[in-house]
Image (tube, rainbow, N blue to C red):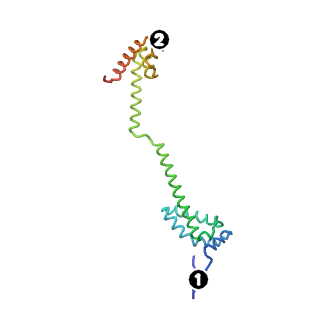
Amino acid sequence: MKQAVHIGGPAPAGPDLQELLGQVARGDQEAFAQVYDLVCGPVLGLVRSVLRDPAQSEEVTQEVLLEVWRSAPRFQASRGSGMTWVLTLAHRRAVDRVRSAQAASDREQRAARLNRTPAFDEVTEQVESRLEREQVRRCVRTLTELQRQSVTLAYYQGLAYREVAELLSVPLGTVKTRLRDGLIRLRDCLGVSA
């Protein structure tokens, strides 16, 4: 946009920003164009200093200028200059964008941690655990029926020897013998040294 050059003196003074904001508050689009020209550079500079990203800075600057158009009726000259008001809007909007981006990044990191694939060691441990369980099951199947019942009740269901004896209707000494013999067979089958 070319500016008129006045020969023989200073250019005639136009309305200041406060007056222009008052006109914008009444819906004056030409006044808004002047406000835009006056504040666009400072707003973009402030926003860019907060965001650092040129594309986001331009986007936020447009949002701020739209907010100036919409909220001009709330501007109060008694509380500060028009430029201060506009730059405060710009700073808040830029900080909001930074916080929003940080929150999104934090959410993505949390989601990534929740969805991460297990480390190799975890997979190895799970496989080894499954293999060990299967080997124990196989070895338990080699016990006699009486040994298997006694071991299952005592070690898998957590019953005391006396409770196992009562449940199977056999003397306590018999249960102890079955358990001792069954555990020896399991130890040998699993290859565990005594």
Image-quadrant location for residue 156: top left
Q: Nearer the viewer, residue 87 or 36?
A: 87
Q: Is residue 177 above or below residue 67?
A: above
Task: Give me the residue at 62% from left, 73% from top.
Answer: 18
Task: Give me the residue at 51% from left, 55% from top.
Answer: 101
Q: Most extreme residue toward the bottom, as rendered?
A: 8
Taking 188 as reference, is 45 left or right?
A: right
Q: Nearer the viewer, mark 2 or mark 1?
A: 2
Residue at disc 2, secondary structure: loop
Q: Is residue 119 above or below residue 133?
A: below
Disc 2 from disc 1: Cα separation: 114 Å
The residue under label 1 is 11
On the image, the x and y values in percent for residue 47 come to: 52, 64
Q: Is residue 55 above or below residue 3?
A: above
Three-letter amino acid code of the residue under disc 1: Ala
Tell me the quadrant of the picture where the C terminus can be found: top left
Q: Is residue 40 above or below residue 163?
A: below
The residue under label 2 is 169
Answer with mark 2 or mark 1, whichever residue precedes in sequence.
1
Task: Give me the residue at 43% from left, 22% from top.
Answer: 155
